[in-house]
C-alpha cells in the first residue's frame, strides 16, 4: 500500500499532514481481527477551527479559478485514483471489513464520480429570463457557498467522499471533510492523492474525530453549507445546529428498502439480486434491500431459495475476498445482535442464520419470515445482513407494504408487467425506484434522491452541482444612450 501511504497519527489541514493540537490519536481497528491497524489524529474543536480557517482562506481564490482549470485539477485527482485502485481498495476493504473485491468496486465508483464532476465543472450555468419589454435584461448566476462541511459515515467512505467532495469542489467551494472515526483511512488516502494532484492548500481538509469534532464542524459559524450522511437521529441534530447559523443542509439518512417480488418475475435473477442487496458490505448500506415483499403465490419457493443462497454465503476477512465480511465495529455488532435477539421474541420465524460467527465482528446472513409490519425488524434500519420477509396478495397490498415505513430511499420492483411496474413506481413514496434490478446499475448521473425520514438531497447525480451553489438573480434596465 506504499503508493497511497500517508503519515500515521495526523490529519490533513491546509495542504499539510499535521498532528492534533492536543496530540490525541485514535486507534483504527481491523473488524475481522479486532486488532489495531494504525492510528490517526483525534480531531477536537481546535483542529476543526484550524480546518475551517484554512478553507475560508482558500475559498475566494478557488471560487475565482477558471472552472475549466478546476475541472482539469479534479480530473488529475481522478487519474491518480485510477492509477492506485488496488492499493486504495485494500485500504478501504481492511478498514471497513468488506471483501477486497468490494473495496475495489467502491474505488472504481469513486473514480467515476470524481471524473464525472471534473467534466461538469465548466458546464454549470444560469438562465436568461424573459422580460416585459426589450428595455430589460434578467439572468441568474450560480455561485459557490464558500466553505462546505461534509460529514460521512464509515460504510462506503471512498464513494461518499467522492459523491460529496467532488461536486462541492467543482462548483467552486472549499471543503472540510469529517469521515467517521471508525473508518477514516480511505478518505485520508484520497486526500493524499488530492495533495499530489496539486489542489491549493486549504481547498480540501480532512479531520477525523468523534461526536465532539462532528458537533464542532456542523455548528461552526465559518461553515456556509453542510452535507451529512448518516443516521436520521443525527441528521435531526445537525439540522437543529444548522438553524442557529441559518446554514443550508443536505441530508442523506437511513433506509428500509424493499425488494418487491411478483410471481411473474424472473426469479433466478431476482433472488440473486435480493441476496446480494442485503449481504453486500454485510448489509451496512443505507439502501440495503432489507425487506423482501413476496407475492403469496411464490412465497414459499422464494423463501426457500433465498434462505439456501444466504446460507451459502461465505464470510471471512477482507484479504480472503469471500462473499461477505464482518460488521465494522463492536458497537455495530451489538446493535445487530440486539435485533437478532428481538425478532424471534416478536414472533418472526427464523429461517436461516441469526447468530454471530467467527473471531471478528461477524454475523451470519439471516432471514426472518412471517414478519409483521409492526415489528422492529420490519420498521427500523438494522445495518446488518438481516432480511425481513413479508407476503402480499395483490398490487394494492404490495403498495401498502412498500410505503409502510418511515423511510423513503429506494424501492426495487421485480415484474414482467410494465404497466404494474410503472404504477408502483408512481405510487411508492421513495426517492429512487429500480425495476428488475437492484439500485441504478447502468445509469450515468443517476440522482441519489430520498424522501420522508431518509432525508433530502440532490447529491451524487446530474443535479448535484446545484446542491452546492446558491443562485443570484440579476435584473438590469437598459438605459437609452
Image (cartoon, helix red, strand yellow):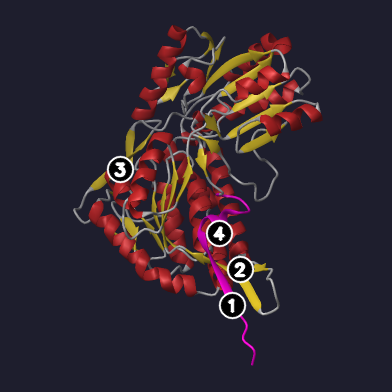
Checking the image for residue 78, the label placed there is: 4
Say if the magenta span includes residue 471: yes
Identify the residue position indicated by label 1 in the image. 476
As drawn, the residue found furthest toward the bottom would be 481
Q: Earlier in the sequence, mark 3 or mark 4?
A: 4
Position of the C terminus, as image quadrant, is bottom right
Identify the residue position indicated by label 2 in the image. 122
Q: CA distance from mark 2 to mark 1?
A: 25 Å
Query: In the image, residue 124 lies at what x, y percent?
Result: 61, 65
Q: Residue at x 34, y 29 (%)?
A: 331
User: In the depicted view, which residue is nearer to us: 446 or 478?
Assistant: 478
Q: Residue at x 25, y 52 (%)?
A: 45
User: In the depicted view, which residue is nearer to us: 470 or 284?
Assistant: 470
Provide the residue span drawn in magenta: 459-481
User: In the depicted view, which residue is nearer to us: 326 or 213?
Assistant: 213
Q: CA distance from mark 4 to mark 2?
A: 17 Å
Badge 2 crowding class, 10 Å Cα cut-off, few under 14, some 14 to 19, many 20 or more, is some
Q: CA distance from mark 1 to mark 4?
A: 41 Å
Q: Does dot 1 land on a helix, a strand or a loop? A: strand
Residue 20 appears in the picture as rendered: no
Amino acid at each position: 500500500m506504499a503508493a497511497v501511504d500517508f503519515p500515521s497519527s495526523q490529519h490533513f489541514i491546509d495542504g499539510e499532514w499535521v498532528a492534533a493540537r492536543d496530540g490525541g490519536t485514535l486507534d483504527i481497528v481491523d473488524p475481522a481481527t479486532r486488532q489495531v491497524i494504525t492510528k490517526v489524529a483525534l480531531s477536537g474543536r481546535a483542529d476543526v477551527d484550524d480546518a475551517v480557517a484554512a478553507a475560508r482562506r482558500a475559498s475566494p481564490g478557488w471560487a475565482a479559478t477558471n472552472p475549466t482549470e478546476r475541472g482539469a485539477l479534479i480530473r488529475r485527482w481522478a487519474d491518480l485514483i485510477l492509477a492506485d485502485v488496488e492499493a486504495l481498495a485494500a485500504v478501504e476493504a481492511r478498514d471497513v471489513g468488506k471483501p477486497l473485491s468490494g473495496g475495489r468496486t467502491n474505488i472504481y465508483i469513486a473514480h467515476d464520480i470524481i471524473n464525472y464532476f471534473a467534466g461538469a465543472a465548466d458546464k454549470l450555468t444560469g438562465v436568461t429570463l424573459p422580460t416585459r419589454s426589450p428595455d430589460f435584461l434578467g439572468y441568474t448566476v450560480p455561485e459557490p457557498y464558500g466553505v462546505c462541511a461534509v460529514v460521512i459515515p464509515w460504510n462506503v467512505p471512498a464513494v461518499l467522499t467522492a459523491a460529496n467532495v467532488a461536486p462541492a469542489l467543482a462548483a467552486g467551494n472549499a471543503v472540510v471533510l469529517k469521515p467517521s472515526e471508525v473508518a477514516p483511512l480511505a478518505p485520508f488516502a484520497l486526500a493524499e492523492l488530492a495533495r499530489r494532484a496539486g489542489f491549493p492548500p486549504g481547498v480540501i481538509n480532512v479531520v477525523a474525530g468523534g461526536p465532539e469534532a462532528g458537533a464542532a464542524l456542523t455548528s461552526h459559524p465559518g461553515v456556509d453549507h453542510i452535507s451529512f450522511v448518516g443516521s436520521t437521529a443525527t441528521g435531526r441534530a445537525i439540522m437543529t445546529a444548522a438553524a442557529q447559523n441559518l446554514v443550508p443542509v443536505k441530508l442523506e439518512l437511513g433506509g428500509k428498502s424493499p425488494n418487491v417480488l411478483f410471481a411473474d418475475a424472473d426469479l433466478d435473477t431476482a433472488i440473486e439480486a435480493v441476496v446480494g442487496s442485503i449481504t453486500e458490505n454485510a448489509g451496512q448500506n443505507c439502501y440495503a434491500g432489507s425487506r423482501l415483499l413476496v407475492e403469496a403465490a411464490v412465497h414459499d419457493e422464494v423463501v426457500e431459495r433465498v434462505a439456501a443462497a444466504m446460507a451459502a454465503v461465505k464470510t471471512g476477512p477482507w484479504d480472503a475476498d469471500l462473499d461477505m465480511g464482518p460488521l465494522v465495529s463492536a458497537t455495530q455488532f451489538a446493535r445487530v445482535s440486539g435485533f437478532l435477539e428481538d425478532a424471534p421474541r416478536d414472533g418472526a420465524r427464523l429461517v436461516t442464520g441469526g447468530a454471530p460467527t467467527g473471531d471478528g465482528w461477524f454475523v451470519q446472513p439471516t432471514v426472518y419470515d412471517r414478519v409483521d409490519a409492526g415489528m422492529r425488524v420490519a420498521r427500523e434500519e438494522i445495518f446488518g445482513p438481516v432480511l425481513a420477509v413479508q407476503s402480499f396478495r395483490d398490487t394494492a397490498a404490495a403498495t401498502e407494504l412498500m410505503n409502510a415505513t418511515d423511510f423513503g430511499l429506494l424501492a426495487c420492483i421485480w415484474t414482467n408487467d410494465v404497466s404494474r411496474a410503472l404504477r408502483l413506481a408512481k405510487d411508492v413514496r421513495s426517492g429512487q425506484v429500480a425495476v428488475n434490478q437492484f439500485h441504478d446499475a447502468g445509469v450515468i448521473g443517476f440522482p441519489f434522491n430520498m424522501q420522508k425520514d431518509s432525508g433530502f438531497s440532490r447529491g451524487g447525480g446530474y443535479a448535484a452541482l446545484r446542491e452546492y451553489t446558491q443562485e443570484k438573480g440579476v435584473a438590469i434596465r437598459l438605459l437609452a444612450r
